[in-house]
């Protein structure tokens, strides 16, 4: 027994000493380069599809199965709905829901797969678009788009967690590359919005580094923007240099190049001021920070200024401007104006400079528009008295502005000195305003000569030019370029172009149209889709006017291209451009397409000219049998204050077979023509140019310029058939003389 134990022990020792090595462990996976970001953003998965109502889910699943392609639905999805009618917005949201149905199962797989990560990237893109204040605000006042509001609220509530979880999943896996890039872009923008400029820049730099030569102008723009916000002037300059090497494919690209260049100059000045420890230097830094979009920096500077100089009017103005901006964005304009007036109402404030008086003027102007103007419509005498009181107080403030901003003060005084007597003429205002508009151009030109480069004066020149009887003289003065730089006053140059086009509609000569086109092409590239859409539509108008005047059919195709581009850019132009595209289709012989476009324009509830699209449809030969009844219905349905539009009445007078109906319609047209405003209205119905006018002269508030002189007048072009001739007015019948009685024989 003992020998056996010894033998076993020896054997055991022998085995232990010669035991084979353990199999090697698998190599450790390298840590994700985005591990810190993953830990920061990761949240538990919360799939949304199970919360979709069963009936809707079944319907969406059915239509999603038609192609089964989540990428087609989600890869380029965005919530840019400014140019879309409700039905198109509904279709876009439906595509998002179908994409969720198709992508969620694989995106939330416990074991990541290539297909699942691609789906996660697509869903992250969608949720990043929905996790924005703009979407939440839109839901509150959304039109009926065919998607239940409660479901939209579910999407908005789910978006933050969904976005974060999917971002973490993509970053942890390090792919797919396009999804990682999308996540880095989104996180950089969110860091910027949160005021973490260093982090925003680091993420933008990482994106550019990853993409290398494939980095786009937009990628470099984001890095340039982030570098400016992070005080990295050298980095911003390098980004701008890289942007200039990229192809310029859109006008927006030009706007981005221009803005980065301006921001670099602002940053240089901002950094130079850091060595100057004065209130004035800090105020300028505050203004520069706002101009560079550095809201958090501006807020910090303002808090410091309020502590150091609480009684300085320059500081109080900037504090009021920030508060006004927030209140106005929330829709509380009148409340915001009242707040500003209260904030600046302390007579003990020191350093009451031009900005101070400008903001007080803006607050009083908003007060006049918000309180006195409604009263004026209800009771001309009482409302006029209230309005005159406010205008006279603004006139006194304008005098205070003369010392430092003489041009702005002069523009304001010109308007007030002519407005106050008109308001006092409570019962004869229409004639007085018409006389002012017809005769105001020379006074505005005299001011422009005295104070060149003042945008407010140029606005008055353009406004008065619209109504000047000598249209060619008016166009000539409009074509004199403003003294303000085109890239600093883009909206002013837009107003100039709209005025020039309005005058070209009336003059209807190739020379006038060429001048208007020049003014349109001098509008600098803008960030605003609305401005860019109007620019495109006006270029279409130039082609349409010339095609009509010269009978050149080739220009209709060019006009159509511009109208299509404008229609896709902004909802505001949808009805007008759709009508004009219908007219072009009619000129090209496509009657069915024209009819469909006219009906689409007429169904657009955003326009008060929708009756014109229906008129165009009725004027086609195919609808001759229903034309008269249609004109009668349109005249009733589009009447305001009992008066149908004159254009409809002209057509009714020319179409009806009832002499009395024709005479009544013609009489109303002639009565409208005698109205003092209609006499100066720019229109050209004889060539088929109906105009939809806009006219405004008033004062408003601005958080950057402090007061706005809202002076503009222009006409948008709607194409239609040339107006038929009115029947001549009936000659008064002479009473017949009574016959003498015959003598009896």
Image (cartoon, rainbow, N blue to C red):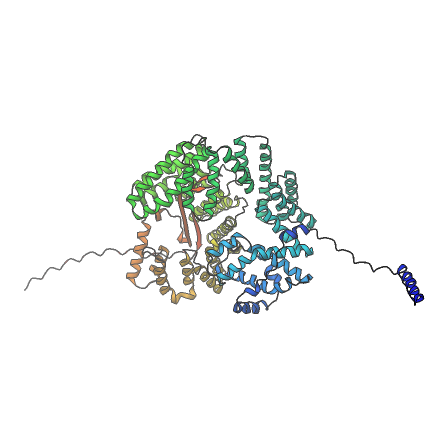
Q: How many marks?
A: 0
Q: Nearer the viewer, residue 735 or 14?
A: 14
Query: The C terminus is located in which quarter?
Result: bottom left
Q: Nearer the viewer, residue 453 or 480?
A: 453
- Report the residue at 55% width, 42% height from top: 296
Residue 92 lies, in percent from the top left, at 54, 60
Residue 703 lies, in percent from the top left, at 47, 41
Asked if one can make out residue 726 in the rendered structure from this viewpoint, the answer is yes
Q: Quadrant of residue 61?
A: bottom right
Q: Nearer the viewer, residue 340 or 671?
A: 340
- Report the residue at 51% width, 33% height from top: 308
Relative vertical location of residue 212 with respect to residue 281 in this rendering, above or below: below
Query: Residue lying farthest front?
Result: 2
Query: The N terminus is located in which quarter?
Result: bottom right
Residue 573 lies, in percent from the top left, at 47, 54
Asked if one can make out residue 468 in the rendered structure from this viewpoint, the answer is no
Horizontal side, residue 680 vs residue 743: left or right: right
Residue 595 lies, in percent from the top left, at 46, 63
Q: Nearer the viewer, residue 683 or 80?
A: 80
Query: Residue lying farthest right?
Result: 3
């Amino acid at each position: 027994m003992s020998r056996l134990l010894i033998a076993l022990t020896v054997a055991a020792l022998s085995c232990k000493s010669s035991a084979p090595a353990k199999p090697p462990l698998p190599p450790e996976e390298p840590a994700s380069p985005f591990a810190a970001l993953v830990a920061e953003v990761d949240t538990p998965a919360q799939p949304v599809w199970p919360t979709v109502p069963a009936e809707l889910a079944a319907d969406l699943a059915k239509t999603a199965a038609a192609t089964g392609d989540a990428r087609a639905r989600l890869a380029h999805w965005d919530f840019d709905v400014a140019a879309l009618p409700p039905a198109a917005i509904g279709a876009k949201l439906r595509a998002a829901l179908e994409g969720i149905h198709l992508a969620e199962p694989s995106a939330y797989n416990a074991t990541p797969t290539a297909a699942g990560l691609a789906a996660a990237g697509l869903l992250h893109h969608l949720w990043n678009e929905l996790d924005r204040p703009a979407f939440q605000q839109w839901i509150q006042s959304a039109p009926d788009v065919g998607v239940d509001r409660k479901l939209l609220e579910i999407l908005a509530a789910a978006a933050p967690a969904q976005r974060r979880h999917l971002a973490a999943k993509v970053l942890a896996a390090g792919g797919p590359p396009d999804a990682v890039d999308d996540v880095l872009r989104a996180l950089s923008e969110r860091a910027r919005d949160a005021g973490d400029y260093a982090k925003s820049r680091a993420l933008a730099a990482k994106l550019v580094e990853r993409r290398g030569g494939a980095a786009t102008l937009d990628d470099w723009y984001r890095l340039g923007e982030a570098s400016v916000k992070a005080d990295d002037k050298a980095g911003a300059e390098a980004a701008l240099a890289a942007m200039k090497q990229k192809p310029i494919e859109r006008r927006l690209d030009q706007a981005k190049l221009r803005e980065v260049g301006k921001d670099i100059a602002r940053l240089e000045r901002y950094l130079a001021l850091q060595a100057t420890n004065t209130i004035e230097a800090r105020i300028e830094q505050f203004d520069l920070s706002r101009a560079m979009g550095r809201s958090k920096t501006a807020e910090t500077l303002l808090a410091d200024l309020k502590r150091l100089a609480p009684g300085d009017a320059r500081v109080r103005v900037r504090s009021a401007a920030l508060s006004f901006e927030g209140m106005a964005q929330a829709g509380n304009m009148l409340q915001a104006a009242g707040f500003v007036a209260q904030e600046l109402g302390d007579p003990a404030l020191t350093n009451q400079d031009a900005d101070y008086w400008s903001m007080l003027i803006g607050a009083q102007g908003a007060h006049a528009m918000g309180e006195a103007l409604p009263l004026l419509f209800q009771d001309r005498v009482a409302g006029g008295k209230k309005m005159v009181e406010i205008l006279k107080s603004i006139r006194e403030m304008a005098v205070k502005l003369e010392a430092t901003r003489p041009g702005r003060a002069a523009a304001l005084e010109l308007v007030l000195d002519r407005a106050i007597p008109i308001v006092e003429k409570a019962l004869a205002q229409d004639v007085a305003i018409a006389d002012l508009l017809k005769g105001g151009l020379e006074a505005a030109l005299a001011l422009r000569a005295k104070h060149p480069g003042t945008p407010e004066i140029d606005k008055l020149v353009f406004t008065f030019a619209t109504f000047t009887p000598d249209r060619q003289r008016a166009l000539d003065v409009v074509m004199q370029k403003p003294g303000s730089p085109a890239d600093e006053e883009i909206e002013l140059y837009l107003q100039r172009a709209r005025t020039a086009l309005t005058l070209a509609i009336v003059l209807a000569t190739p020379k006038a149209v060429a001048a208007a086109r020049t003014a349109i092409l001098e509008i600098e590239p803008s960030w605003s889709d609305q401005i860019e859409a109007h620019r495109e539509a006006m270029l279409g108008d130039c082609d349409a006017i010339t095609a009509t005047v010269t009978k050149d059919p080739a220009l209709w195709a060019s006009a159509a291209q511009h109208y299509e581009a404008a229609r896709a850019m902004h909802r505001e132009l949808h009805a007008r451009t759709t009508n004009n595209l219908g007219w072009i289709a009619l000129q090209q012989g496509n009657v069915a397409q024209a009819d469909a476009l006219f009906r689409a324009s007429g169904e657009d509830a955003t326009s008060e000219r929708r009756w014109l699209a229906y008129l165009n449809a009725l004027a086609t030969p195919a609808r001759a049998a229903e034309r008269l009844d249609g004109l009668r219905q349109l005249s009733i349905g589009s009447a305001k204050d009992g008066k149908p539009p004159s254009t409809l009445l002209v057509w009714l007078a020319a179409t009806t077979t009832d002499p009395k109906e024709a005479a009544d319609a013609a009489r109303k047209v002639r009565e409208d023509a005698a109205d003092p405003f209609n006499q100066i209205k720019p229109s050209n119905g004889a060539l088929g140019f109906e105009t939809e006018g806009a006219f405004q002269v008033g004062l408003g508030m601005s958080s950057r310029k402090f007061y706005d002189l809202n002076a503009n007048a222009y006409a948008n072009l709607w194409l239609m058939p040339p107006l038929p001739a009115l029947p001549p007015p009936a000659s008064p019948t002479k009473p017949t003389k009574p016959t003498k009685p015959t003598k009896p024989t």
